[in-house]
Image: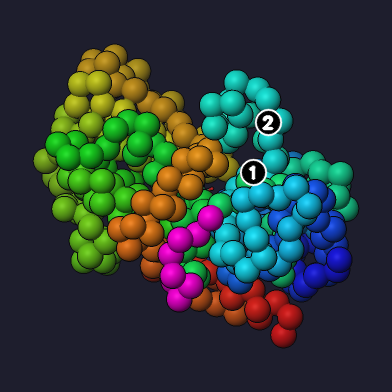
Amino acid sequence: MQVFAYGAHAADKPLEPLRITRREPGPEDVQIQIAYCGICHSDLHQVRAEWEGTQFPCVPGHEIVGRVAATGSKVTDFSPGDLVGVGCIVDSCKHCEECDAGLENYCDGMIGTYNFPTPDAPGWTLGGYSQSIVVNQRYALRIRHCETQLAAVAPLLCAGITTWSPLRHWNAGPGKKVGVVGIGGLGHMGIKLAHALGAHVVAFTTSESKREAARALGANEVVVSSDARQMAAHLKSFDLIINTVAAPHDLDAFLVLLKRDGAMTLVGAPASPHSSPNVFNLIMKRRTLAGSMIGGIAQTQEMLDFCAEHGIVSDIELIHAEHINEAYERMLKGDVKYRFVIDNATLAE
Ligand code: NAP
Ligand code: ZN
């Protein structure tokens, strides 16, 4: 089936309207009519070939929500009309230790929603800046929010799970002090989720102008990270810091804020490396510097259900597809509160 999409033909070219082909649903597939797709900073890294290995044409998008349009003969979990989501994973080996543990995100055979090998044309996966997508039912998520919230649910499929997973892994909750560095798409979800889990939340930002907004998102305190005095007030006090920054920066400035056995997990994935942290900042208080990648399918469902129950969605700016390139430039400047979401109905206009 041919559908409208938006993508780029080269790293230095803007995204433009494209026609792509989607496979017919196989026995275990669900075909999804995409209503909305969030714009993640990873989309920009990939489409501009800031990360290695981008295949062109590249159609990004892994914060997908919509309705099931058709199901294969062996699909048991979904029916046409169901509200569903697809995040960053559309396939995995299904039999390794990671898949068995529900950690498909760490399967060596994980297939990402875009730019990963597939038998489907053109040979690599094409993402959610498109009218529809076909995925194996294992990788589709059920959405229990009400339909009026659907556009604002889309960013949960990446920004939500990427911050939820480390919050759960490091047991964020009452009595824990959690820092979130960078108040963008991921960071604003990290603040909302950590707050909802009952942690004491401190937002770190480079933008003084985000102070009040960060409080409104649920941060108990806000620190402008360029202000040494504000930073020093939090020395040796954090259980967990989630660092979402999309550019290389000084990690030591945050490591020294961890208390004994505290952990900072990097989720931001800049194109070029950070300078190495000072090893003494790890040794001295048995601190951990970690990383975390999205989350497994079961945990993504757990996060979606938690958000539905607690009335949590993303703060979004809904855009027409023809404004995607402009949205990228604004995202780079931090000029978004806090996630752009594409109205996929506009792809056909
Ligand atoms: P985003 O909306 O652009 O937010 C990033 C935030 O980082 C900005 O709003 C800004 O916040 C801060 N920042 C940007 N440049 C900075 C700099 N030079 N120095 C200090 N702070 C800076 O991006 P996003 O969509 O949240 O994604 C963030 C990163 O996570 C990207 O690298 C993305 O590829 C990665 N990511 C990783 C995973 C994973 O599984 N690990 C999943 C999704 C995305 P302030 O204005 O508040 O300082
Ligand atoms: Zn993403």
Picture quadrant of residue 67: bottom right
User: Helix, strand or loop at disc 2?
Assistant: loop
Label disc, if present, on residue 94 of the rendered structure: 2
Q: Residue at x 34, y 39 (%)?
A: 167
Image quadrant for the N terminus? bottom right
Secondary element at image label 1? helix
**134 left or right of 263?**
right
Q: Where is residue 192? Give x, y as percent.
A: 30, 55
Does 115 sit left or right of 165 as displayed?
A: right
Q: Residue at x 39, y 67 (%)?
A: 315
Mark sitting on residue 138: 1
- Is residue 298 visible in the rendered image? The answer is yes
Of all residues, the one furthest to the bottom in this rendering is 349
Crowding at mark 1 (Cα within 10 Å: few <14, some 14-19, many 20+):
some
The x and y percentages for residue 294 are 51, 41
Q: Give the range drawn in magenta.
A: 142-149
